[in-house]
Image (cartoon, rainbow, N blue to C red):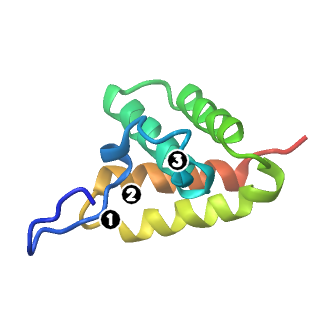
């Protein structure tokens, strides 16, 4: 939890996790953690106004490195990014935007 205060309780988001829990924890072995990490990297790149192509390539490469089977997990990771892009719009607009970008990058990625 990012905040346990009554009426303010919320789960941690991509910017709360940053680089934490990337290995050695059950959460790190699933799909959500690598997707959150990629979203945070894209969010930071947008803030810095980094080159979009370079930051997008870096995000996809990071996902490939952090997922055990990119070919099999790519569709589910895309669904997670799309869902986050829709649901975070009101409370975390920067993360929502980065999630939508990530979903688009995964959907339009050329394989092989």
Considering only vertical position in the picture, is 107 above or below 7? above
Considering only vertical position in the picture, is 107 above or below 37? below
Q: In the rendered structure, find residue 96 and report the number of the disc placed on it.
A: 2
Do the residues under discs 2 and 1 have CB atoms within 8 angstroms?
yes
Depth check: 72 or 88 in front? 72
Question: Would you name the residue on which mark 3 appears?
Answer: 25
Left or right: 85 as drawn, with respect to 112: left
Residue 99 position in % (x across, y down): 47, 54
Query: Tag 1, which secondary structure?
Result: loop
Left or right: 75 as drawn, with respect to 110: left
Sequence-first disc among 2 and 1: 1
Taking the spot 50% from the left edge, 69% from the top edge, the residue there is: 83
The quadrant of the rendering that contains the C terminus is top right
Say which quarter of the image contains residue 31.
Answer: bottom right
Taking the spot 53% from the left edge, 30% from the top edge, the residue there is: 55
Query: Tag 3, which secondary structure?
Result: loop
Query: Tag 2, which secondary structure?
Result: helix
């Amino acid at each position: 939890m990012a905040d346990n205060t009554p009426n303010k309780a919320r789960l941690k988001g991509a910017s709360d996790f940053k680089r934490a829990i990337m290995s050695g924890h059950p959460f790190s072995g699933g799909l959500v953690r690598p997707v959150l990490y990629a979203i945070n990297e894209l969010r930071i790149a947008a803030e810095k106004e980094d080159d979009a192509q370079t930051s997008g390539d870096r995000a996809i490469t990071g996902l490939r490195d952090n997922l055990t089977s990119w070919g099999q997990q790519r569709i589910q990771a895309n669904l997670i990014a799309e869902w986050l892009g829709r649901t975070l719009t009101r409370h975390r607009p920067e993360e929502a935007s980065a999630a939508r970008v990530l979903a688009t990058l995964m959907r339009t990625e050329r394989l092989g």
